[in-house]
Image: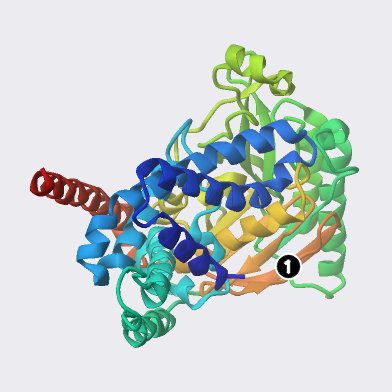
Amino acid sequence: MWPLAPVGVALLAAAAHRRRLRAGAGLGFLTGVALFAPLLEWTNLHTGYLPWILLSLLQAGYVALLGAATAWVSPLVDRYRVGWPLLTGVLWVGQEALRARTPFGGFPWGRLAFSQDTSPLLKLAALGGAPLVSCAVAVAGGLLVTAAWRDWRRPAGQWHPLAGATAALAALLAAAAAVPAGAAGGGREVTVAIVQGNVPRLGLDFNAQRQAVLDNHVNATVKLAEQVAAGAQRRPDLVVWPENSSDIDPLRNPDAGYRISQAAEAIGAPVLVGAVLLGPDAGQVRNAGLLWRPGSGVDLGQMYIKRHPVPFAEYVPLRKIARMVSAEVDRVRSDFVPGTTPGVIDAGAVTIGDVICFEVAYDGLVRDTVTGGGQVLVVQTNNATFDVAEARQQLAMVRLRAVEHGRAALMASTVGVSGFVTPDGRVDGATGFNTAAVVVRQMRLGDGRTAATMAGVWPEVALAALAVAALAGAAVLRRRRTVAAG
């Protein structure tokens, strides 16, 4: 419910204003727990409560820093009340920028921008990406608290101008809605099929029947080929299988490679396969997107290796220390090795911008595929270890990325939710959860660049720099007050 995001921002801004730093941090921490504990509940579905609790508390710690920062800039707010919305906006972006990078590469889940998939503010992504959308949400929250704030130490009737803040909020929403969103340099259309093969059972042991998962995707593709041959379905230019659709290394296992070749030959189109590859060294694996062409098999020149493996899920940093907290880390027997190049894959009829699973939350990883020539965005994911809540949260991120870069996008999941997203953020053909499905749609190729694509990280840098400047300005003002009182 996107309108509640600015309300939550406003409540924290009002609660932390004029508080001591310790009180501001405490209020921020409570806010963070209230945000992240329900948001990340899907992490405890199959791993127990401990990872969920630890992750939620870690993320809440960043919101605690935000609460302390909000309390710290109170003198600036009191002196320049009209700046309250801007201060709120830049502090939120600063907090999200820090959280998206630390520790172990960060965890951007739960950014304000990702709550706005059905909001008028979503279109701002085309101008400044997720940081600008988050800033706009927080500014809206700042406008709400500006409109409602009253200094109770002053005589009755001394309310801050409600009309001005309300008008500014309406202007923000109207300006965002007026931003054009759509295909950047939209070109011809191609036909793409998503194959959601499903798994024998959900949970951490979904891949205990790896052959069954692979067979599900092969059989679904062959069935699609039969529909094409019967004239009931358009022949796709590309077929997309999800992450973990072949956890049997098809480069080393001839049977797995043969089965995938069967599917590609039957459909007569290249298949993007989500595979786990052994190596390069003993005890190491790689999470890959492989292009399998009919007639010639795997194209090793068109391969993407996931660049941001998930810490404590795909690899375990500080394993000895982590084991002291929970022996569950030993479920990760082989560490995933990160790739080094963006996921740009030339499939012939279309150049794919591929990212895998959680990578869709990271601005730079998605942008690199577009600047590298990706004409459509593809997110290969496996939600079998979580639930439908995680899948829907991820699809909301795909919607933002489509608008941000003016690219048609899709998310292909083993179990759902899979679906296509138009360059203006609309979802088409979304599948159910824990079901098998095949969806075929036309996707318009994009070859231009939005303002957000061209700007890259600079909007976030500018907004975060303003946050640092606000903290420094508050320090100067506090020092002056101390000297004056001294």
Question: Residue 391 falls in which quadrant of the image?
Answer: bottom right
Residue 263 in the image, given as x and y percentages of width and height:
79, 50
Could you tell me which quadrant the N terminus lies in? bottom right
- Between 24 and 349, the residue placed more toward the observer is 24
Question: Residue 417 falls in which quadrant of the image?
Answer: bottom right
- Residue at numbered disc 1: 430
- Between 233 and 199, the residue placed more toward the observer is 199
- Between 224 and 410, the residue placed more toward the observer is 410
Residue 356 in the image, given as x and y percentages of width and height:
59, 45
Give above or below for 240 relative to 227.
above
**Residue density around tag 1, few if under 14, some if 14–19, many if 20 or more, within 10 Å:** some
Question: Residue 163 falls in which quadrant of the image?
Answer: bottom left
Give above or below for 128 relative to 19.
below
Q: Amino acid at mark 1?
A: Ala
Q: Residue at x 35, y 51 (%)?
A: 71
Give above or below for 259 relative to 12.
above
Q: Residue at x 34, y 82 (%)?
A: 168
Which colouring convention does the figure follow? rainbow
Residue 203 in the image, given as x and y percentages of width and height:
82, 39
- Between 262 and 365, the residue placed more toward the observer is 365
Residue 123 in the image, given as x and y percentages of width and height:
45, 74
Q: Residue at x 85, y 43 (%)?
A: 202
Could you tell me which quadrant the C terminus lies in? top left
Answer yes or no: is residue 407 visible: no
| In-image side of 92 versus 87 (left or right) | right
Answer yes or no: is residue 310 visible: yes
| In-image side of 405 versus 217 (left or right) | left
Give above or below for 337 relative to 73.
above
- Number of labels in the image equals 1
Q: Residue at x 32, y 68 (%)?
A: 153
